[in-house]
Image (cartoon, grey):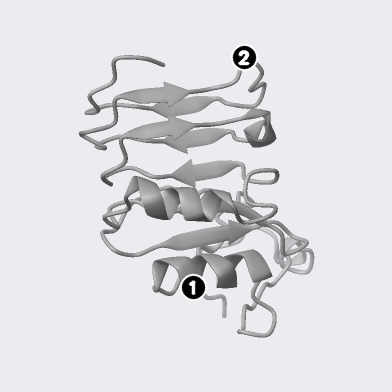
Amino acid sequence: MFIGAARQNEDALLHLPIIVQTKSTMPALVQQIEAILQRKLTLAPARDGDPLANLMPVKTDTPKYAVDSGGEVIGLNLARMGLKDAVWKDMLDLPGLAEGLQGLNLGGNTLTDLVFTTEWAALRRLDLSENESLGSIDLPDEMPNLAYLDCSNCALTRI
């Protein structure tokens, strides 16, 4: 009996990494983010081999994170959490936040001004939608992996 999505080949199950996060195995970065937000983040399970597939969909006040097969944080969904600029800036001070993130969802918050440096070069998906007061986004010239950017329903005057 298999729980979850049906698998065409039972042998494929032998090669899937099973990641169980406990407080002792949870990445330190996630623990630091939880301390700043005063909220628990839940691990978004990979779907069809894509660790970001279940990360980006939004549920209000349900922050999530995704990890790669090595347990490194590669995605954050902090959508609709009432996130303000000051809290986001506190998070930006966390070592290692930007370098490995491939997916980031900050949609539906109250952010007004965002700056992304070349440290964010690994980003593939960035959702900033529904930050109604977001007036400017600074992106570096070099973001070679960015394939999806959603800035809908923002008050952007400059990108």
Q: CA separation, marks 1 and 2?
A: 33 Å
Q: Could you say whether the residue bearing mark 1 is in a helix, strand or loop?
A: helix
Q: Is residue 129 above or below residue 52?
A: above
Tag 2: amino acid: Asp
Which corner quadrant holds the N terminus? bottom right
Give the residue number, with chain letter if any, for mark 1.
Answer: 35
- 145 or 114, which lies in front? 114
Tell me where residue 71 appears, x and y as whole percent.
Answer: 72, 64
Can see residue 104?
yes
Q: Position of residue 13 (x, y in %)?
A: 71, 67
Mark 2: which secondary structure? Answer: loop
**Residue at left offset 43%, top offset 33%:** 114
Q: Which mark is residue 141?
A: 2
Residue appearing at x 62%, y 14% in the figure: 141
Residue drawn at (61%, 49%) of the image: 50
Query: In which image quadrant can residue 87 be found?
Result: bottom left
Residue pictured at 29% horizontal, 63% vertical? 61
